[in-house]
Amino acid sequence: MIQRRDVFQAIADPTRRQIISMVAEQPLNVNAIADSFDVSRQAISLHIKILVECELLKIKKQGRERYCEVQLDQLREVDKWLAQYRKLFEKKLDNLENYLEKLKQERQHGK
């Protein structure tokens, strides 16, 4: 399947994030997912279609039912993107920790 959208577009929508969370717990059919939202089944189907296109969900047919299963491998791209900012925040927190330790030592020595 050719990806039409990227994973960042898929998780940008809160409904799609909620669908991912629900399906991560257990595979669900489209009707069960749609019953949890106050929007039309067609709207949920569109969200699911986007998640499938982004390879965050896959559909498995069991008899007449179509079950959505989560595929979280694509979220590694998000984690990789966030890692650069995680390092930046860690560096800032380390600098703050060093500054606070320096202040603590200055107070102990009466400066």
Image: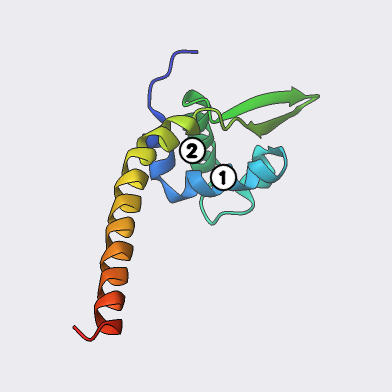
Q: Report the disc number at residue 19.
A: 1
Number of other residues with Cα within 10 Å of mark 2, as a class: few under 14, some 14 to 19, many 20 or more: some
Q: Report the disc number at residue 47.
A: 2
Q: Position of residue 83 (x, y in %)?
A: 38, 39
Please identify the quarter of the rendering in which residue 12 is found: top left
Which residue is at a point 37% across and 41% down the rendered structure image? 82
State how far apart marks 1 and 2 are (Cα): 8 Å
Quadrant assignment for the C terminus = bottom left
Which residue is at a point 54% across and 31% down the rendered structure image? 56
Residue toward you, 29 or 94: 94
Q: Amino acid at mark 2?
A: His
Q: Position of residue 55 (x, y in %)?
A: 52, 25
For the residues bearing labels 1 and 2, Cβ distance under 8 angstroms: yes
Which residue is at a point 50% across and 46% down the rendered structure image? 17
* Residue 48 left/right relative to 23: left
Which residue is at a point 54% across and 57% down the rendered structure image? 38
Residue toward you, 22 or 108: 108
* Residue 78 left/right relative to 48: left
